[in-house]
Image (tube, rainbow, N blue to C red):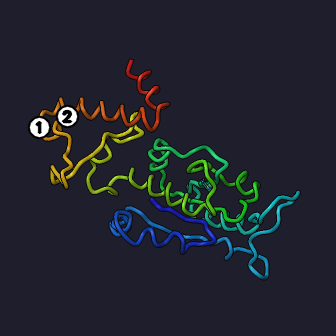
Amino acid sequence: MKYTFVTLFPNLIEGYFKDSILKRAIEKGILEIDYINPRDYSTNKHHKVDDTAVGGGAGMVMNPQPLFDALESLKAQDENVHIVFMTPVAKPFVQNDAKRVAKKSHIAFVSGRYEGIDERVIEKYADEVFSIGDYILTGGELASLVVCDAVSRNIDGVLGNADSLEIESFETPLLEAPSFSKPQIYEGLSVPSEYLKGNHSKIRSLKLALSEAKTKFFRPEQLKKHQTQSH
Ligand code: ADE
């Protein structure tokens, strides 16, 4: 998978790939990262990339010209690139999206800064738009990293242990049961005793009960979905 980050601030993104799982995936040749800075495409003599909003409104909006030219050059390099815009005005990104777009060969994440991106750019170039949640970030960079990370876990070879992809939260409506590590008792706090007895069917039913309790507390609407599905 190749990721191209279209951003005015590549430094905000680069550090994330310098450690841990995604660094290893780059070293193994599974992932490739590239950056395009729309400022490099600005025809303005001061390399300006934004302006006040036509029709009024607060803040600066990213102009179409640098982004049109940047995205044309990207499409000329790879006509199959899947272009994703990060904006709070979009469908919320969920696990199924992560699994679906993990099958693409090249994803470009376009991050807006200021008050947003001229809508004509989105109209012309977006294959899809994602929001990562109902809050406003100072720019799309963090959002693009969130999506990139969640997608990457679903690409073969990125996670060391393929098992960890098997049953995860959000692939069923239930939240995952709690996990415990060693020692069995730490500072007087014990792992649930059923986890220690080795009866796998009992462990499974306890985990299901704990999943349901967590889901009921944190995400009651998901529990309803689970109950409808399992009847
Ligand atoms: N840019 C600013 N806020 C955002 C959000 N919540 N999701 C995606 N992109 C954004």
Q: Which residue is mark 1?
A: 198
Amino acid type of the residue that numbered disc 2 sits on in the rendered structure: Ile
| Residue at the image position 54 percent from the left and 75 percent from the top | 11
**Residue furthest right in the image:** 55
Residue at image position (77%, 82%) is 46
Query: With 221 as the anchor, is 206 left or right in this view?
Result: left
Residue type (three-letter) at the residue carrying disc 1: Gly
Q: Within the image, what quadrant is residue 140 found in?
A: bottom right
Disc 2, disc 1: CB below 8 Å?
yes
Query: How many labels, in total?
Result: 2
Circle 2 SS class: helix
Point out residue 175 in the picture as x, y percentages from the top left corner.
38, 38
Label 1 neighbour load within 10 Å: few <14, some 14-19, many 20+: few
Q: Can residue 115 be seen? A: yes
Which residue is tagged 2? 203
Q: Is residue 173 visible?
A: no
Which quarter of the image is occupied by the C terminus? top left
